[in-house]
Image (spheres, coloured by chain):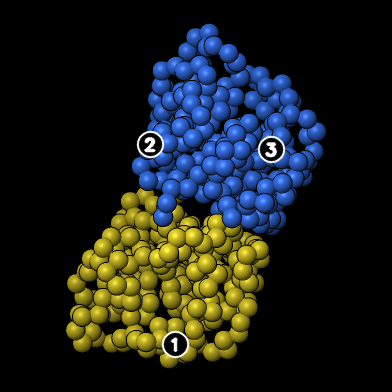
Chain colours: A blue, B yellow
Amino acid sequence: MKQLVRVQNFCVSRDGYGAGEGQTLERPFGNVDPGRLVSWAGATAHWPNRTDPGGTLGLDDYFTRDFSNNIGAEIMGRNKFGPQRGPWENHDWEGWWGEEPPFHTPVFVLTHHERPSITLGETTFHFLDASPKDALARAFEAAEGKDVRIGGGVATVREFLAADLIDSLHVAVSPLDIGAGERLWESPEALTDRFHLEKVPSPGSDVVHHLLWRK
Amino acid sequence: MKQLVRVQNFCVSRDGYGAGEGQTLERPFGNVDPGRLVSWAGATAHWPNRTDPGGTLGLDDYFTRDFSNNIGAEIMGRNKFGPQRGPWENHDWEGWWGEEPPFHTPVFVLTHHERPSITLGETTFHFLDASPKDALARAFEAAEGKDVRIGGGVATVREFLAADLIDSLHVAVSPLDIGAGERLWESPEALTDRFHLEKVPSPGSDVVHHLLWRK
């Protein structure tokens, strides 16, 4: 099977926002509590950040365990990697995730300000000043035949959608309105000219899983 | 995370049958056309037997791609391996699946009539005269930290359920009635004393995915 470009477990509000306004070091999702967007995932057995045993093994868990299933590399935007803007003042910042980030593959961070790669646990961050197409070529090579996940944030997913480089998306829509910030879509139907769309209400939480794949 | 014992992509009729009566070499599911039970899976991009490109990437595909996700070994009953009964007349029979079976792991075949192991492609079949508990200990060891799939048929799943050795089940229920043969359950509610149950209608096919996991 050919290598796919996948968006997985991308969490947005009912009105389509993946983050609020005003990202800071303390608030990576700006003026939105990310817990309200990701609580469905935090309850599952395979949530990557889970530290205690237990958790559900229902439909929501199929999505959290698919997050890493056959993924060989991730591409993320700089704003997912950190709150800094412009040239790096220093290289002390190594991401939000501590010594064992939940990616466990090469990760390509798109930025106009390149810097040396960082290895933390099983994850290596590479910093690339490249177009989506060129970044994807690098990620496909690094993935060694496995799929590539487009990790976000919103602007990065939109950029890859605009370049028509995405094969499939899983977007979990939570029943809250955010109103301003980083918006993935006004409505998922905006993508149905190019993508199939299935909406699957979770029996175990309050999200509706949206599954899209290229026509 | 601890190793799980999982039933995956197990297909039954609305009245709970996984196979009809009268299994033969030509009819591994007896007097039932297995196409009517598994067509939902055959339409998906990650169906293991798919030979042409294409296929859907919606909810049904999450289940076909989870079939092998983090699975390190399978346990199956002898009747899944072949139509013979009693002592092996010879060792010519090597399963239904040809030179590259879709398991790609060690497979433990439960039988009172042991025979030498067979390696076909990435799959090795071992033949064990053992209790479910002892077979599971062997499979856990072979799985090297990954999960163990209970592959069926119906009698084998029921035996492992009776021994309370199963952590989770995915059962795809198709809208047809079979009436006689190998029956998994009269109703999935028969398991809800010990298992959580979520029923998820597929938006892309006519099955209802039943997800059960231990309370």
What amino acid type should be assigned to the residue bearing mark 3? Leu
In the displayed structure, B133 sits above or below A128; it is below
Q: Is the residue at mark 1 from the same chain as the one at mark 3?
A: no
Are labels 1 and 2 assigned to the same chain?
Answer: no
Mark 1 lies on a secondary structure that is loop
User: Which label is found at residue A184?
Assistant: 3
Residue at x 44%, y 83% (from the top left corner) = B29
As measured in the structure, the alpha-carbon distance from the residue carrying label 1 to the one carrying label 3 is 50 Å
Circles 1 and 3: CB atoms closer than 8 Å? no
Q: Residues within 10 Å of mark 2 (few under 14, many from 20)?
A: some
Whether labels 2 and 3 share one chain: yes
Which quarter of the image is occupied by the C terminus of chain B? Answer: bottom right
Q: How many marks?
A: 3
Instruction: Name which residue lies at 47% across and 41% down.
Output: A148
Describe the element under mark 2 as helix, strand or loop: helix
How far apart in space, not on screen, are marks 2 and 3 (Cα)? 27 Å
Q: Position of residue A158 (x, y in %)?
A: 63, 36
Which residue is denoted by mark 2 in the rendering?
A142
Q: What x and y, as percent, mark residue B39?
A: 53, 73
Q: Dot 2 falls on which chain?
A: A
Q: Which residue is mark 1?
A: B30
Amino acid at pointer 1: Gly
Residue type for callout 2: Ala
**Distance CA(mark 1)–CA(mark 2):** 47 Å
Label 2 or label 3, whichever comes before in sequence order:
2
Mark closer to the observer (1, 2) = 2
Residue sitting nearer the eye, B57 or B133: B57
Q: Chain of mark 3?
A: A
Q: In terms of secondary structure, where does tag 3 sit?
A: loop
Question: Does residue B209 appear in this view?
Answer: yes
